[in-house]
Amino acid sequence: MKKTVSLIFILCLIVQMAMAQKRSISGVVRDKVTNDLLPGVTIVEKGTTNGTASNSKGEFQLSVNNNAALSVSYIGMSTQEVKIGASSTVEVFLESASEKVDEVVVTAMGIMRQTKALGYSVQDVKGEELVRVKEANLVNSLNGKIAGVNITNSGGAPGSSSQIIIRGGTSLLGDNQPLFVIDGVPIDNSTSSGNSGTDRVTATSTSSGNRAMDLNSADIESISVLKGPAAAALYGLKAAAGAVVITTKKGKQGVPQISVSSKMKLDVVSRLPEQQGLYGQGSGGAFNADTGESWGEKVASGKPFYNNMNDFFQQAWAYDVNGSISGGTENANYFMSVQRLDQKGIVPTTDYVKNSFRFNGEQKHGWFTIGMNTNYIYSTTTKTLTGDGLYGTGGTGYMLSIINWPRTDNMANWIENGVKRRLLPGVALQDDIDNPNWLVRNNPVTEELHRFIGSGYVKVSPVKWLDVVYRAGVDHYNSFNQSITSPGAAMIAPYDKGAVSEKLRQNDLLSSTLTVSANQKINSFDLNLLVGHNYEQTTYSNNTQTAVGMLSSDFISINNAAAANKAFDSYKSQKRLTSVFGEFRLDYKNIAFLGVTGRNDWSSTLSPENRSFFYPSFNGSFVFTELLNERFRNVLSFGKLRASWSQVGKDAPVYQTATYLNSPVTTIGGGYNDSWTGGNPDLKPEKTTAQEYGVDLRFLKGRLGVDLTYYKTTSDDQIIQPRVSNAIGYIFKYVNWGTVENKGYEITVNAIPIQTQNLKWDLNLNISHNDGKVYNLPTGLELLYVTDVQIGPAKPASVNNGDFLGLTGQKWQRTTDGQLILDPITGYPLTSTDATKLVGNREPDVILGLNNNIAYKNWNLSFLIDIRKGGAVYNATEWAMIKTGLSKETEKRGENYTFEGVTLNSTTGAYEPKSSTVVLNENYYKNIYSAEASNFITDVNWFRLRTASLGYQLPDYVCKKIGFVKSIDVSIMATNLFIITNYKGMDPEVSAGGAGVVGAGSSGIDYAGVPATRSYSLGFNLKF
Amino acid sequence: MRKLTLIFLVTIGLIVTSCDYNLDINTSPNTPQTASPELRLPSILSYTMDIYGSHGIRTAMLCQQMGYIYSANQRYYELQNWHFLNNADTYVWQSWYIYSWINISKMIADAEASEAWHYVGVGKIMQAFGCGFVVDAYGIMAYQQGLSDATFRPDYDDAEYVYSKILPLCDEAIADLQKTQATTAPLLSTGDIIYKGDTQKWIKFAYGVKARLMSHLSKKTKGTDLLQYNPDAILSLLSKSFASNADDAELKYLVSTVSNQNAIQYQNTTASVKPGKLWTQYLLNTLPGTGKSWNSGVEDPRAKKLIPKITSGANSGKYSYGVDLATTDVDPKSTNANYVGLKSTDSNKLFYTQQDSPFDYMTYSEAKFIAAEVYFRKGSKTEALAAYKEAIKANIDKLGCTPAERDAFLSSAAVAQTADELTLSHIMIQKYITLTYSPEVWTDLRRCDYCTDASGVYNESAGVYKGFDRPKFAYALNFPTSKDYLRRYQMAYMERDYNAEKVRPFGVFDTDYMTRPVWWDIVK
């Protein structure tokens, strides 16, 4: 494969003496790895604007000055400088840009720039990396590959969300995920759950997808991650949390490229919580047929004892088929692709089916280029109820049913004579536990999505130094969500008679962007100016309809309920944003770079006085190695210092500048009352200020690269909706309050430890640390809770002068000097329901991703090791298992335990020391042990082999024998092959409420969701 | 190229100029921002009733009228042991401010603008009534800065201050109700779900509210100043207040599948909410000991309207057992058939807990009990006896007992028959029964110091509420010694969490906070 490996750049010179001032040269450009001819490569005579592009056969001709040098550049490839000398023909081999000094990345507004010119850190992932171990959810593909990016998969359900946070959250109560931009247009990456009041689907009721997962990884050429406001400044307020800039593939000049790939994947449960293996159904140590709890008697040996939890999950297959065709001529190119993904879940009945179709096309005419990128996605997801199930119905999610199922009963026997076998036939239906096998088949939650993402653009370059680009984009989707409760469910009336709720969401994001950029070289300075205008309109609506109490019990429909038992609700919102922005860049001899940006936004969500806001950014970099002598540069090939300072504003959510009424009340007499959220006409924009410093060093001609970044981001005047003193008449009020400060570092190491003719080992290490803190909350208001996820004795919260990703909860009562207060009568610790005590910080101390890619002849082995140190995970699943007596911990039941503490003297009211030996009984576990949050919180470390793949490219002669096939790749892959962790529950990479939970989010909350999976897959890839 | 360029420029120009740049679109199309008075009043009246009733079931737990099955960490179970879980302390506070008062305040402002004086008057009565029961329970509240737009951290006022403001509000309300409305103003009857627009009844209620609030000052120096105990003024107010059960400020709920149209105590009770032992002993007059009315053994005719009967097992047909606060760590279990839930069922249709039961802000019977107590305290025992008997009679009638049952009971040993025989205990224990589920019971218990003697120790012969002892499992952290009684609600956690600096000076974070009497509970 590699013809020459000791040199990074190869140029072949055929020497010919020529004395003329101006002469013509000709040449060809090839891909160094594949030897393919490369069309459309830009060839410019260095220091001039004289240039051309290679034709469909990779050939070019150019008239140059004597002793000229050529700069040969191509997207995704290292730019090469070729000295012509006396020759008149040249052959240039371009090499993929990864790990090279002259790497080109996509930056804000789709501008391609050399990394060496950047005053801030940008990392990217190439398309081939994304498909090597192709994840169903694109966001997961970024895990471990980019320093400073924290990705939390919400669980193992197909079609479930994955949260991406770059350099810590900046917003106390807003979405902290970055802006997603695809081919220059912003798209929606929201994760929506239902509404506890209407369809009763809360964030923890089921899994929901984040909308970026609709994209097909195989369509993607590259993903650039703009990590901070400096990098994303041009995108403005939506990019305060960074931006993920996605570029899809384009066709290349030449014969059509056809590729077909297919993958089969097998998912199995990765980890399950430990269960007790001694006690059976009952309470108080005795059998009780009326409870599903496992507080019964010790099971005699020989009696059946089932492993209901493990037996419940299934092995799940997924098939992913991709086809694409691409090609082009000198003036036109196209790329078309189709994908079908059919993924089953480890929970029976669940699945995710996605169909994606893409067409990208581009046509040039003179100085005009027009193009469009279109993507249509149709997907369906069948989900199961998780957590507590539908809000306020008395039912449970499937996992809580398992936790409520005694192991003395075989849960697999769920149907008897065609009807549900009841676990507790002696109790009222609503007090029974639904068999999870019945639950998943009868109470499904489904989603059907139609989405169109498209953009059209025109690029005009009337003169060499001027580009005008206009781009219009649309991201439209509607999703139909349905939740069914079958008659006979163990729920409170009227849900036990069956219920349906349906929600139709529609989201439209229209964008229009005009940019004008000019480039001039004056002496040693390269100047670049860009100005632009942007307009965006987001329209969202949803309609919910619900019906409870099915009239005919074997027919589930909104229509099958009495009129009085139906309800509907409608919501609409619209938001507009107009912006002008500009950027000025200056490049001095490729040694020093300076960039300045400014942007002014006008947002409809703020009052007229506050809606206009301006923010600037500055960045600079200095390539000091340019000043060093050649000998030194043999060791330190490249060295750059960079620094940036930037600001980004952020507007408010819609409709918060006024106080509204609630929907009409349903109490006697009807009428209206005020909403419990107070509006605030004086809201002003949030402001995020970021500083970033970095050094980028490459040694030994790129064999080793080290990049260090330190950053500090401060977000002031947060627009938050805290709970406030109710005495002002509202529970929540929108205010500008509080500061979030994120400080951290990122270390990236790229190395090629081995590089020989047949063997190359690439290594990429990403280490990051972030520390998110909250300041300036008003005195007396010390906590901001995440309202969507409040389970058991702890809940996620941001704490003033403390952790952004905090956890607060209940603790046993202690005296001011920390002594445990014991109940004077019972001797057990006194509990408290005050849930404001700080009990953990969910932010990891360090996350580390180590990517390895080893190529040996036709073989390719790659694996990603993922290490995390620190960061609290709250095991609310264990809390539920303690309650029902299924937890391993409860095997200690009956043992004595001695508490040391103090107790109150009932005559004097004073504390006196007390030592009490008590029995660890059912009451203790259910009511006392469970009320101490620290019993369920672990500071988690893990070491996991996140992905591994082994690929083999069939030798050329095989393809030649077949004839019409250009190449055949076969690979086996695995994810989550093993994990070593101190966490006792399921996979500690959890997020009970998924990516849709805003503010401090629900990462690190483990509550009866779908456990993460381990998967094995086999794939092949054919090119024609 | 030229043509193309032109087309390009024109097209872009058209697109860019055709975009709708209007940014004044931040008004929600989903819900309105204003509502006229007749649209706010029904929800004010129904929500306030729900809040008052939910406050009532909490105080019923605190006051041993109700009991809860053994279920550690359950709100009501803990509440009967005077342990306030977070959600126990906050509902009344939160709902008063966010469901009632904010809407009352906006309704009054709108009604004043449209000269809908009757709405203004009703609003002021509800403000006085609601702020009254909130400050009685919590001891402090944000009154001056309550509902403030200018701060998120309002200051709090003592009960004394609040009383000084809400007592005059009752007079203003009466004046407003006597005014003539503008012809364009909405008729009170449109939004009035209590009295259907009868301003005379509202006026009687206003007098009643003021009398009730002034009667709370029984520990204060006697005198004629606004904030002193003034028996004559109270009796004068009462003379203009309720004249019969027909005047009761009552909301009759509905049989409905919409749960919040069902009676508040139907909503609040469950099969796990059981009768309290003391309450059943008062109703059945079986309190052990003293040989007085309360252990006369005469069954109150209201017992069968209030106490459920056992439906299975050996004791089937007998009255449900009452929850004994000495054994609540073991009894009752939810499976024990001898303890029957207070939520009405087909076999136990009880007065307050059916879907269409009523609940009252204030009743004629209560007014008579207030009179009886005031007469008693000023030494007019004959008038006290008459008012006491009329109060009992009115309540027995209200609960739907027969006149024969009523008269038999009134002349029995369970009721004081002579002025000499009459004690404060007679009045207050009968009032305790009559005001089942009413927050006033706890106010009375505190004013009368439960069943303690002058030294604050439980004393059945000296105490007013015979047999009312501390729960055995009273939460040790807050009530460590036998002299520690519950004197106020734990401060709402929303205020402790979100306005900590302002509530801290009132001692809300001290473990003995709840043993500190509110303003009117301090003898002076």
Image: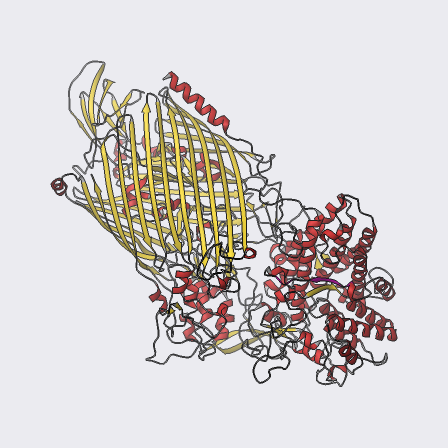
In the image shown, does A147 or A369 lie closer to the viewer? A369
From the viewer's perspective, tell me whether residue A518 is left or right of residue A82: right
Position of residue A730 measured from the top left corner of the image (x, y, whole percent): 63, 51
In the image shown, does B241 or A286 lie closer to the viewer? B241
Q: Quadrant of the C terminus of chain B?
A: bottom right
Quick one: which residue is furthest to the top in this view?
A20
Q: Report the coloring of the rendering.
A: secondary structure
In the image shown, does B170 or A109 lie closer to the viewer? B170
Tell me if residue A212 is in the magenta stretch: no
Residue A514 vertical placement versus A318 (above, below): above
Position of residue B166 measured from the top left corner of the image (x, y, whole percent): 77, 56
Residue B158 vertical placement versus A524 (above, below): below
In the image shown, does A110 or A969 lie closer to the viewer? A969
Q: Quadrant of the N terminus of chain B?
A: top left
Q: Is residue B200 visible?
A: yes
Q: Which residues are magenta?
A: B247-256
Residue displayed at 81% across by 71% down:
B373
Q: Name the image quarter holding residue A976.
A: bottom left
Position of residue A24 measured from the top left corner of the image (x, y, whole percent): 21, 17
Q: Is residue B492 visible?
A: no
Position of residue B75 measured from the top left corner of the image (x, y, whole percent): 59, 67
Residue A598 vertical placement versus A543 (above, below): above
